[in-house]
Image (cartoon, rainbow, N blue to C red):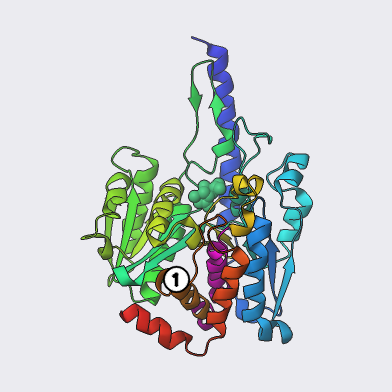
Amino acid sequence: MDQTAILKATQHFGKLLEVQMKSMEKIKAMPDWIDYGKLKPIKIGILAGDGIGPFIAPEAKRVLEFLLHDEVHAGKVEIRDIEGLTIENRAAHMKAIPDDVLAEIKKYHVTLKGPTTTPRKGDPWPNIESCNVAVRKELDLFANVRPVRIPKQGIDWIFFRENTEDLYALGPYGIDVDADISIDFKLITGPGSDRICRLAFEHAKKNNRKKVTCITKANVVKTTDGRFLDNFYRIAKEYPGIEADDWYIDIMTAKLVDEKRRRDFQVMVLPNLYGDILTDEAAEFQGGVGTAGSANIGKQYAMFEAIHGSAPRMVTEGRAPYADPCSMIRAAAMLISHIGYPETGKKLEMALDICGQYEKKMTITGRANGATGTAYTDYVMDWIKNSKLKTAWEGYVKG
Ligand code: IPM
Ligand code: MG
């Protein structure tokens, strides 16, 4: 047995624990929720991202600027671009987020972010950490909130994915112990589980939802998922009017496809990796990952993003103008609601629903046989400006 390898791995593990314990102290000492109502201006930063990002981000920005025109004019909101979060710049600095870009991001209360390339072993880029994951950790954006709604099928789900822990927390810090053995680390903390579960229940309470479902694999992954599940049921006791139940991730994946059962699910809360996988599946029913938005929420900052990747192949094949901007525009709708303009956010969501699920006058295929992102955004804008938007949407939803 290679005792040196064991010792080295043990020391590595010890260092990770030190870092983790320190960051736990920091998290416990964090200030409480920011009050957007007290900010003047609320500063919104746009991060275009890589690949198709620079094609879809300007479309989302255009919608945002149109809908918040009056607020910008009144000095209540400010919208600016933040440069430098590109794969080229990140690779040049060998960092998930270059220091100056991170400092800039921290000057904004909320950001709207395009997709960013996440390198992996064998890519032309150095194997640096995903910048999505790094931003989430740096700004302590502990909740990844992903709604999926298909009114005509009675589906109205909202996922509360824990966003800073689990296999993601130490994703870049695994160990190749020797020639044969590699180990990664899965981290779940009590405070981390409590705050995401509480947010899910608070959402249910505020929105009159009757049930919150926790999803784990606690029958196999006993310690970490076990803790998440225990904490879920402990928090559930604080919300006696709301039903709490739990499912394992494998059967949950199947149940989302089950047309007899899937309408029963409402609010779901789950650890990071299961949430990553399940929300892609859920978004597919709504029309694909191009149609779903994602909110990364923390107590001080929030970042809104498309749930899909940067699709570099679309760029090399010349198809980037045909990329679907809807996921990023949906993220913009979530941003608008989050900073205190829920009616404006809802308006944008209704326009997206009409265009994508009902009227469908135009479709995006990602190729020249479909609409361009710009033409599609014009289509969405026409509906936003249409005085009959609400009536039309209600008519469609009632069928
Ligand atoms: C997502 C993405 C990211 C994730 C990737 C790009 C790192 O898939 O936001 O779901 O795994 O969280
Ligand atoms: Mg994902």
Q: Is residue 35 left or right of residue 108?
A: left
Task: Identify the residue at image location x=64%, y=35%.
Answer: 127
The location of residue 339, given as percent across then percent down, is: 58, 75
- The residue furthest front is 369
Q: Quadrant of the C terminus?
A: bottom left
Q: Is residue 154 visible?
A: no
Q: Is residue 384 above or below residue 248?
A: below
**Residue 326 drawn in magenta:** yes
The location of residue 337, given as percent across then percent down, is: 53, 76
What predominant SS class does the magenta segment belong to?
helix
Pointer 1: what residue?
360
Q: Is residue 333 left or right of residue 267?
A: right
At label 1, which amino acid type do we have? Answer: Lys
Q: How many marks?
A: 1
Residue 104 falls in image quadrant: bottom right
Residue 36 falls in image quadrant: bottom right
Task: Identify the residue at image location x=42%, y=85%.
Answer: 392
The location of residue 15, given as percent across then percent down, is: 60, 33
Label 1 crowd (10 A; few <14 / some 14-19 / many >=20):
few
Q: Is residue 277 visible?
A: yes
Residue 235 falls in image quadrant: bottom left
Q: Nearer the viewer, residue 241 or 285?
A: 285
Helix, strand or loop at disc 1?
A: loop
**Residue 35 drawn in magenta:** no
Task: Identify the residue at image location x=56%, y=64%.
Answer: 371
